[in-house]
Image (spheres, helix red, strand yellow):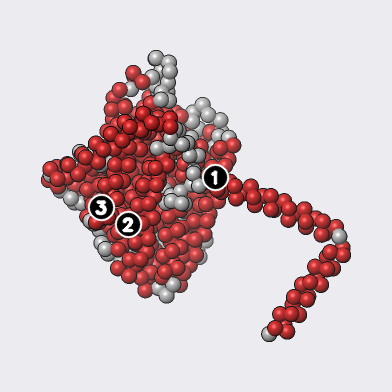
Amino acid sequence: MTDAAVWLGAALACPLALLLACAWRPARERMLGALVFAPLPALAAAVLFDPEAAFVVVVAGAYEGRLALDGPGALLLGVASLLWSAAGAYAATYQNQQPNQGRFVAAWLLCLFGCLGVFLAADMPLLYLMLAAMTLGAAALVFQDESPAARRAAAIYLALALVGETLVLVAMVLLAQAAQSWFIGAAAAALPHAEQRELIVALLLIGFGLKAGLVPLHVWMPLAHAAAPMPASAVLSGVVVKAGIIGLIRFVPPDASLAAGGVALAVAGMFSALYAVAIGITQTHPKVVLAYSSVSQMGFTAAVIGMGIVSADPDAPLLAAFYASHHILVKGAMFLLVGVVAATALHRMRATLVTATLLAVGLGGLPFTGGAVAKLAVKGTLGGGSVASLAVLSAVGTTLLMLHFLRRVMANAATQPQARAAAGLRWPWWATAVAALVVPWALYLGLSLGTFEELVAPKALWAGVWPAAIGALLAAVLARIDTRLPRIPAGDVAVAIDVGARGAARVGAAIERADALLRDWAVAGVALLGAALAIGVVLLIAR
């Protein structure tokens, strides 16, 4: 077994071992400080990436799961591990004085185990197990403070996640039948020729689209991110939503025969990118604004995948993963920033806010930032025409929304003049922010996704400057008219879910009362049986 294969196994063994140790209460209560180390074997596995390496997981001698990495998976796993580690260090301070520390640690490790496993699983049963573990851990993190908002958010997240996983499971079964294999690579190769291709593609797009938070399947994101503790929000928004992205990348290959599905994904993605901006600027809670920004960015990433399918671009999966990796770091840094700002007086964090502004505007493509690198990398895949125009509009909207976030987060700064966030909050934020600035450049040049000359060409610089300038101008206008905007509830269409749930509860109560009445009335039971027999007789005669 090669070193790369050993690290693949260690990537899951480390968080799993810590999770099992949580069964012993003294260990569980002292586990916060270990969270920073739990993702490091996964980082090593990504750095030592070998496409030929595999680690076999034998369960009860009857099932052999396989851990392996491809290019997009290694890219996302490595960057995700960085954020999980920084957020774990942040959590050691942020959660230190909070109640239910042991439950938080167990939920964190379960979510981490499943999340890393999603990037590593090479066969469908193991992937489904990892998705389930990630969902349960994430739901517990959202539920952590047990407030009514947290209970509602966790319930909606868990319900929608299970719906998405059910659809994905059905697609997996159909793919396994078509490919005569449970391996994801074989299933993806068989998809273009499967008899039920259109159905499978629809199930995959909806199931993984829900995981990625595409509109209208996004309602769980603003609710969950607002309710979860700060470090949990960072990994939920930065990493957990990437389960949907890696699912789309691995199961729906760039193949011309799947062009219809690619068009549907591109349309849904671009609609999500713009819709989320429109709703996000009406929000006042910084974490909710960030959640809508994540909906927008996941929509843009989905559009890249969709256009790659349409054009049968073999480079599209890696480029989409690269774009998503930049979002992991930026969005993680922004959520960690919320906690830092809340504990610090404004005059004591000028450097922090300057860096945060650079990251915020960079997400829209400001030259010389990681966002500019990410935008340029996917530009060719998006092509020209209307899609290119929508991509530019999305860049303007992203800048507007992120500057709106900065204004909202600064309004929540500590009021005490000497207030300053603890070092355990500041340094993880700085580590993530610096990584968001440096890592995309290193990956772009190291993976030969493009050249430095392309990044600094006058045309590329201008293409990044003017959307950012328009977005900044619109943000200034928004600051003046903000109080006149409608306040759309977080989760927007989740309001309809609440109405439907209340209606279903009333219908259920009415049915229960009717059932109790019928059970107490023997004549009604006889009449019901007679009616059933009569219907049966009629059906037999009709035949």
Q: Which residue is mark 2?
A: 305
Q: Tell me what residue is drawn at x 21 percent, y 40 percent.
A: 466
Foreground: 43 or 536?
Answer: 536
Residue 203 point in image, percent of width and height: 46, 63
Quadrant (top left/top right/bottom left/bottom right) for the N terminus? bottom left
User: Which residue is at 67% across, 49% downward?
Assistant: 505
Pointer 3 residue: 388
> Is residue 160 rendered to the left or right of residue 270?
right
Of residue 15 and residue 212, the one placed in the foreground of this image is 212
Of residues 497 and 320, which is closer to you in this image?
Answer: 497
Residue contact at pointers 3 and 1, CB within 8 angstroms: no
Tell me if 460 is positioned left or right of 148 in this view.
left
Is 215 or 227 nearer to us in this picture? Answer: 215
Q: In the displayed structure, would residue 215 be above or below residue 39?
A: below
Gap between marks 3 and 1, in whole Å?
33 Å
What is the three-letter code of the residue carrying label 2?
Ile
Q: Which residue is mark 1?
A: 495
**Residue 481 position within the rendered picture, expressed as x and y whole percent measured from the top left:** 38, 31
* Secondary structure type for disc 3: helix
* Residue at 30%, 22% in the rendered image: 350
**Residue type (three-letter) at the residue carrying disc 1:** Val
Q: Judge depth for marks 3 and 2 and give the one in front.
A: 3
Secondary structure category for the residue under label 1? helix
